Amino acid sequence: MAKYYGLPSDAGVQSDSKTVDAQTTYEKTRSALAIALAGADFADLGMGSTESFTLFSPIQLMIDDEIVSNVTRIAQGIDINEGTLSTRVIARAGPGGSYLKQKETIKQFGREHLQPRLSDRSTRLQWNASGSVSAHERARERAEELLKTHLPEPIVSGLRKDIGSLIAQYTKDYDLRRLESIKS
């Protein structure tokens, strides 16, 4: 309806699961993908939430980041043209040759392939040798690492004033004039 009337659209993505588990992941992935493919302008994934936005989990936040990365990549679609089809590279490799080893193919793969942050792409032998770490544990490790190492960029004073002005401008019609008095 929003597209029909030329309005921006928003949709919420949630899970009814009570914990960080497979149900949370497939419910959020399914909903986010459907919303993205339908062309919504914005989807509130409730980053890190479970149980219908009731609970928050840093582990779920890491999994949701992976979901968003994958859904965003899928929603971008696949660009089909002579360059992306590698017709010249394949012709140059010729019968019996391998276009997969060509620089152009490797560059194209790098542009098209999403490199996951949490998914394990190793063989079972490699996975076992590295400790058989589950996706849940990898998400926990990533959250812990980000909490230890992330340093947010400070908001510069000019931007802080601009944000204050925007808040005042957009809230003046809602009788929230007290926000105008907030000093930066």
Image: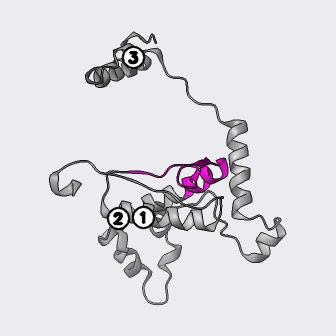
138, above or below 84, in the image: above
At horizontal 38% and vertical 74% (from top left) the residue drawn is 86
* Label number found at residue 37: 2
Q: Which residue is mark 3?
A: 179
Q: Nearer the viewer, mark 2 or mark 3?
A: 3
Question: With 172 as the anchor, is 115 left or right in this view?
Answer: right
Using the image, tell me which numbered label, if any, was put on residue 45: none
Question: In this view of the protein, which residue sits in the foreground, 77 or 80?
Answer: 77
What residue appears at the point 47 percent right and 52 percent down from the top-left corner? 45
Q: Is residue 64 magenta?
A: yes
Going by the image, does 150 lie left or right of 43? right
Residue contact at pointers 1 and 2, CB within 8 angstroms: yes
* Amino acid on which disc 1 is placed: Leu
Q: Residue at x 37, y 81 (%)?
A: 91
Instruction: Describe the element under mark 2 as helix, strand or loop.
Output: helix
- How far is disc 2 from disc 3 in space, using C-alphas? 38 Å
Label 1 Cα neighbours within 10 Å, binned few <14 / some 14-19 / many ≥20: many
Within 10 Å of disc 3 (Cα), the crowding (few <14, some 14-19, many 20+) is some
* Rendered image: mark on residue 33: 1
Amino acid type assigned to the residue bearing label 3 in the image: Leu
**Alpha-carbon span between mark 1 and mark 2:** 6 Å
Determine whether label 2 and label 3 are within 8 Å by CB: no
Which comes before the other along the chain, label 1 or label 3?
A: 1
Which residues are drawn in magenta? 43-66
